[in-house]
Amino acid sequence: MQYTSPERNTWDYYLNGASFMDMNEESKIAKRPIYLGNGGKILTATNDAKKLEYGDKATNDNMVSVQYMTELERDLYDALRAAGVSVERAGTDVVVILVRGAIMRMDVAEISSNGENLLGTIARILRKYNSTYIEIAGYTDAMTDTSAAKRMSLDMAERVGVFLARKEIKPSRMFIVGRGSARPIAAQDSIGRLTNRRIEIRIAPAR
C-alpha cells in the first residue's frame, strides 16, 4: 500500500520534542535535557564496549565518536546506493543528501514508494545508531517568492520527520528546518534545479 502522510493537524503530535532550529553546538547543548529525558544516550568511552586504556577522557570520547560515526557512515553508504542519494562526511558528522525526486512524488508533496523504501532503510540504521542527533533540512531551487520557498522546504523536512517518527525515531533527537533556496549545490539550470530540491539529513554524535 502506498505510504500516505498523516493529516497535517496531527504533525505536532508526531514531532513532539523536535526542535525547529539549526543543529549547532549551542542548540545541541540546549536540547540535551530533552534528549536525555526521553531516554537518549550520550556517546562516551565509558559506555562503549571497546573501552580505551590511554589518553584523557575527552580524547577517548572523541575517538569513540569518530569510530561510531565511521561505522554509521559505512552502513549508510552500503545500504543507500541509489540514484539521487549520496552519503558524505562533514567532520565527525555524516550527511545523507536525498534529491527530492528520489524520495517524493513529482505530482504532489508526498513521499513516494521509492522514498518509503529509502527512508525506511535510513530509519532502520538510525535506530541502530541511536546515540545521535539528527538535523532534517529541506531545500528548494531558486524561487522568486522566498517565503514560499521557506514554506515548501519546511514542509518537505517536516514530512520526512513525521515519517521517521512513525518508524520509531524519537523526535527528541531531531532538529527540523526549512532553508528555502539557500546553499545551492548545483547550478540553477534545468538539471541543477532538480538537484537543489533536496532533503539533507545530518547526523551528529550525541555527546
Image (spheres, helix red, strand yellow):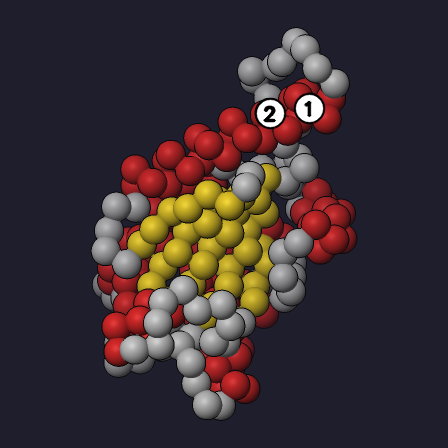
Farthest-out residue, top? 53
As helix, strand or loop, the secondary structure at mark 1 comes to: helix
The reply to whether residue 9 is in sight is yes
Q: Position of residue 118 (x, y in %)?
A: 31, 53
For the residues labelled 2 and 1, the Cα–Cα distance comes to 6 Å
Q: Does the CB distance between marks 2 and 1 fall below 8 Å?
A: yes
Quadrant where the image shows the N terminus: bottom left
Q: Hey, which quadrant is residue 188 in on the image?
A: bottom left
8 or 62, nearer to the observer: 62
Specify few, some or many for label 1: CA neighbours under 10 Å numbering under 14, 14-19, or 20 or more: few
Specify few, some or many for label 2: CA neighbours under 10 Å numbering under 14, 14-19, or 20 or more: some
The number of discs equals 2
Mark 2, residue position:
63
Residue located 31% across and 71% down the image: 192
The reply to whether residue 153 is in sight is no
Q: Hey, which quadrant is residue 47 in on the image?
A: top right
Mark 1, residue position:
59
Residue located 56% across and 17% down the image: 49
Residue located 56% across and 63% down the image: 176
Quadrant where the image shows the C terminus: top right
8 or 49, nearer to the observer: 49
Q: Position of residue 75 (x, y in %)?
A: 37, 35
72 or 8, nearer to the observer: 72
**Residue 68 to residue 108: above or below:** above
Label 2 amino acid? Met
**Residue 125 to residue 21: above or below:** above
| Left or right, residue 126 beside residue 26 | left
